[in-house]
Amino acid sequence: MFPIDQRKNWYSGQGLWGNVPEKDWNDWTWQLRNRITTLAQLEQLMTLTPDEKQGCLFAANKLSLAITPYFFNLIDTKNPECPIRKQVIPNIKESFIAAGESSDPVGEEGTMPVPGIVHRYPDRVLFLVTDRCASYCRYCTRSRLVSNAQAYDFHPELEQGLKYIESHPEIRDVLISGGDPLLLSDAKIDSLLGRLRAIPHVEFIRMGSRIPVFLPQRITPELAEIFRKHGPIWLSIHTNHPKEVTQELAVACERLSLAGVPLGNQSVLLNGINDSVEVMKSLVHRLLMIRVRPYYLYACDLIEGSTHFRAPIQKGIDIIRGLRGHTTGYSIPQLVVDGPGGGGKIPINPEYVQAVHDGILELRNFEDRTYIYPTGSKLPDPNPKLLD
């Protein structure tokens, strides 16, 4: 791992739970059993704003409150604008539904041939295997089913899902998600991955999980060995802010990497949380230091009650422009909008192509300087000149 002094200011420790035996603190099942799940528990640990207090009362009907002790320690309890706090503590603003918002903003229900399988793209499926998470992101695009606060009554049908995949030879890629699939037991994960690996036409298995961020203690040597046995299993984690990249997350990601798990990161562009070049540059640099490749930067989906989270898409474009040329290409995620209603991921990029004409491509680089590139058989000028 990279030298310890390069991450000496990264969070590590038990914080408010300093009296808990280290053995318990590092046990992921202890973390789950001791999650903060009620308003009363929260108010023992911090002073809530009126909007947060009302939000906690509303959460029972929208998306449950749950925060692991480990992740709670990252919250600045004295700062209502804390970027970690905003992500996991309910706010009454979640009750406001704006025009265009939906309980199923990316149209999963319309492309679900059997319970738990979303088959939107020709060669791949999304396999929803649980409705539970270690902690709940307040902007969750699946809040209709995650935590079952809305009585969606989702019950994973693993056998039915596996049979669907087995019977559709066009499926070469399976993304396992939920909820969070790493909340399943080791035995269930082992069995599920083994069943998928036994399907001849499945070439590529992925998981989406925020467990390494919310609950790094879950990434045990035993779990890493399961990934090694069935690998390569690609894993996308979900961090939004550099404060989430801790020493504990670094250890978890190293364990996964050394087990042969390629790691990527998906962020959601969130108003007042990560909608600046400075914050995102710090985040992506930290991610590369722990062997995680920034993958996607999502515009926040039009989930009901998310207006206060959504940042202007122009801010996302400005972030990508502010990263390109100013840091390595490895650290630049793809900005995407997940097309409302089921359009799939649509890439959004700064405009670098200025014009195409007469076999000539006019390009503008990260310094806003314009260059000429021949696109046809016409030979380039041996002494090219800048246009500006």
Image: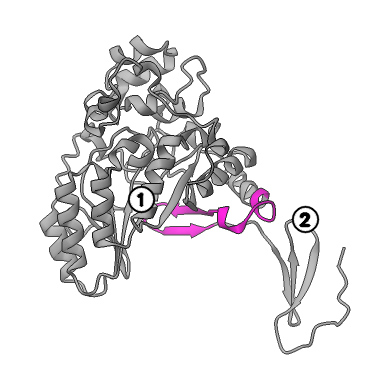
Tell me the residue at 21%/58% (across/down): 193
Residue 7 in the image: above or below residue 369:
above
Location of mark 1 (residue): 256
- Residue range in magenta is 322-347
Q: Position of residue 89 (x, y in %)?
A: 39, 24
Whether residue 127 is visible to the viewer of this picture, yes or no, is no
Residue name at image x 24 percent, y 74 percent: 201
Residue 291 visible to the viewer? yes
Front one among 108 and 349: 349
Q: Residue at x 43, y 25 (%)?
A: 93
Rate crowding at label 2 as few (under 14), some (14 to 19) or many (20 or more) other CA atoms within 10 Å: few
The correct choice, above or below, for 251 with respect to 12 in the image is: below
Residue 11 higher or lower than 184, as above or below: above
The x, y position of residue 215, in whole percent, is 33, 35
| Pair 1/2: label in front | 1
Q: Quadrant of residue 301?
A: top left
Mark 2 belongs to which amino acid?
Answer: Glu
- Where does residue 222 sit, x and y in percent of width and height? 23, 47
Could you tell me residue 217's position as x and y percent?
31, 36
Residue 159 lies in quadrant:
bottom left
Looking at this view, is 108 or 251 the one in front?
251
Q: Secondary structure at mark 2?
A: loop
Label 1 CA crowd tier, 10 Å (few <14, some 14–19, many 20+): many
Three-letter code, disc 1? Leu
Front one among 283 and 363? 283
Residue under label 2, please give it: 367
> In the image as oriented, which residue stretches furthest toward the left?
159
Q: Secondary structure at mark 1?
A: helix
Labels 1 and 2 touching (C-beta < 8 A): no
**Going by the image, does 331 lie left or right of 210?**
right
